[in-house]
Image (cartoon, helix red, strand yellow):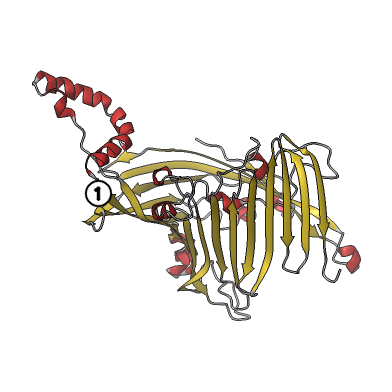
Amino acid sequence: PGLGGSREQVTAARVAAGLPAQQQEVATRDVTQETVQWSTGINYQQRLIGSTTLTPSLRLSGQALRHDTLSAASGFVSAPMRLSFGARLKTDLYGFYPGFASFERIRHKLSPSFTYDYSPEVTPNELQRQVFGSRGVQARNVLSINLNQTIEAKVEQDGDAGGEDAEARDAETADSLAADAAGTAAQETAAGTGDEGLRRLETGRTVSILNLQTSATTYDFVQADSAGEFLAGFTTTTLSNSVSSDFLRGLSLQLTHDLFDVEEPAEGGGAPRPPGAGRTFDPHLSSMNLSFSFGSSSALFQKLGLFTRGEEPGEAVEPGTGEGELQQEEDPFAPASGTDETSVVPGGLDGDARDRTDGGDSGDVGTWNAGLSFALQRPREETLPSNQMLQANLRFHPTEFWDVSWRTSYDVEAGRFNDHIIRLTRDLHRWQANFDFLQTATGNWTFRFEVSLIDNRDLKFDYEQRSRLGR
């Protein structure tokens, strides 16, 4: 059982329609909307065959609403309690194919799941109908479908070395089977076989060639019946796919498609159309996000022996652990500490400061990380502009105490760079010096120099100089 929370939303609305324009800008009032939701339920998961599970559920829910702009809801109004029941079916389907190159076998795994939820129509009173409308009290008959796919490969083992690696990777599994193995050992010892009959079969290393995760699609049968159109029942109007692979762990690709094109109603068309009416199935790529991070610890460069220094191939760090941090690199021109000229209470350290509280740099000499990202926004409406943005960043450690980072963004649609940010960092035992350079899309530049104590960033000396066009 679970209890939902309350939600309060406050917005500003103009109420001075008859006042002059200058007074209308400041004549506002607060509009408050409060919602309290609660639910309690029970479910039971039953395993059917293999990894197939069926989970029936029963749930009781309700809500209360208060809104300043609704005279009927000036105080909390409770909605009719809803009883809903449903079930979720989840399974895994496998397809096996012959291997190639160093792969012993290929496996294609499909993981579909189906979730069904039904709630009968409730009988509201007149007040509840005014506050929640017909959509809040009508029956619900919803089906959700989700599908994930994985293509995996089993890598061939190289004799005894492969067996030792397999045993190391299977250590946890061996511990969990210790009790059963002990019982089997006792039986085989009694039969005269001894410990030789307890040898574990060697298993090859499994890698993921391709992971494809697709967002869930939801269909409401009641909404489709109300509109009289099959496509009107889809409450999910966008479909997202995420692609990744173990061979390029720094690569991330996300695609979002707008599934339907809605026909605009004719002017003066009479009664409003029901939700979802007038749709046609026309997938449109609305957004794409592509990012790729790599560095001196990437497996590709380790195997090729390129751009590495002082590292053995076997000591390669897992890609994606230290490289992805470049995607969330802090802006050096944001306040470096929790205080500014107007604050008196010290704050916490920023992200870069937390990484350097030990007084040393965050990487070995010669290590480097780089990242590229591309973002695309394509509205279906031709009147709305599209947006394409390319971002790049680089960070490296030329010496033991120096750290250099560079970040830039390029607007593909406008054909120009938006900004350039360069930061030079020098560690001085428990102190740290930063030299920051920023150039904006308008040509303005900023130089900032700061020396701060790592243990207390509020103890610092800083200097900043800015420029403007024509000055």
Residue 101, compared with residue 282, is above or below; it is: above
Q: Quadrant of residue 130?
A: bottom right
Residue 324: % across, % down: 53, 51
Look at the image and tell me whether residue 123 can be seen: no
Point 73% across, 51% down: residue: 435
> To which residue does mark 1 refer?
156
Front-lying residue, 426 or 221: 426
The amino acid type found where label 1 is placed reads Glu
Between 128 and 202, the one nearer to me in the picture? 202
Residue 430 percent across, percent down from the top left: 70, 35
Q: Name the residue at 54% across, 49% down.
A: 366
Label 1 crowd (10 A; few <14 / some 14-19 / many >=20): some
Q: Residue 308 at what x, y percent from top left? A: 48, 51
In the displayed structure image, the side of residue 143 where residue 192 appears, left or right: left
> Image quadrant for the C terminus?
bottom right
Is the residue 102 above or below the residue 274 in the image?
Answer: above
- Regarding mark 1 in the picture, which secondary structure is present there? loop
Residue pictured at 63% horizontal, 64% vertical: 409
Total marks in image = 1
Residue 198 in which image quadrant: top left
Q: Residue furthest left?
A: 191
Q: Measuring from the top left, give residue 348's x and y in whole percent.
A: 71, 38
**Res. 349 in view:** yes
Q: Is residue 457 left or right of residue 5?
A: right
